[in-house]
Amino acid sequence: MLQAVGRTILIVEDEAPIREGICDLLAYHGHQPTGVGDGERGLTEALTGRYALVILDVMLPGRDGFAICEQLRAARPGQAIMMLTARGREQDVLRGFECGCDDYVPKPFSLSLLRARIEALLRRATPIPATPARASNTLQIGPLSLDLDNLRARVGERDIELTSRDLEVLEYLARERHRVVPRIDLLREVWGYDRAEKLETRCVDMHVVKLRRRLAELLPSGDSPIETVRGVGYRLRVSEDPAG
């Protein structure tokens, strides 16, 4: 059974029964939900930085969820964001990830699955306690330098902007660089789904598509180091830093 951790969660949803139902579910499990019914108020509230997780509907009065997600991600890169919407077409899901969401849950949904995905996002969003400084464990991916201990990425002397989920995917692929990583392993180890084999979702594929595109834009070669092995999963081309 998942354990409640009492986190603050913002739900931006214009349908009152859905908004109130999610708030009741989260409050029952020990969280502190706040419900907002329109996009403008939702964005203002989300930008306060008071929330461990922001849950957004797409079709909102005032400002749609895609616009909120994009603006919130730009202002608060580390914010955990989930989109919860009836717009479940592939192009809508891809747009959600491109705007910066960490998870995309189509309606209708089961409350048990919704809660499991919320708890998974909250676990990943929990800060890791500081530890004494030590030598960095670094992998070199062409000109991209990945600090595995601190989950930071640089190209040359320049820090590059990647989401926390992007860095988690790269970190896991880098640690498992000597094998092809099946999608189900990423779903379990990075997305946090304990029963990944029972889920039907393309969130891994869609996120990797977005990440590969982002890396191709950032790297001088114009190519992504993430390789797709058809029907199996993904592999990362790396050259290890001999000093790391």
Image (cartoon, rainbow, N blue to C red):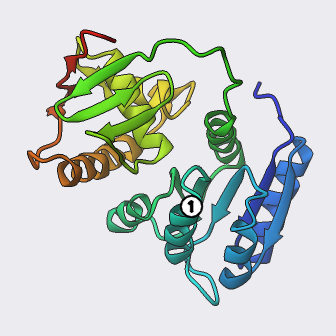
Q: Residue at x 23, y 11 (%)?
A: 178
Along the line of sight, the residue nearer the viewer: 28 or 121: 121
Check the image and report above or below for 125 versus 106: above
**Position in image of residue 219 (x %, y %):** 18, 46
**Position in image of residue 69 (x %, y %):** 54, 67
Could you tell whether 43 is left or right of 228 in the image?
right
Quarter of the view holding residue 175: top left
Check the image and report above or below for 4 versus 92: above
Quarter of the view holding residue 183: top left
Q: Residue at x 61, y 53 (%)?
A: 79
According to the image, label 1 marks what residue?
83
Along the line of sight, the residue nearer the viewer: 239 or 206: 239
State whether residue 184 appears in this view. Answer: no
Quarter of the view holding residue 125: top right
Residue type, numbered disc 1: Met
* Circle 1 Cα neighbour tier, 10 Å, few/some/many (<14 / 14–19 / ≥20): many
Q: Residue at x 70, y 67 (%)?
A: 46
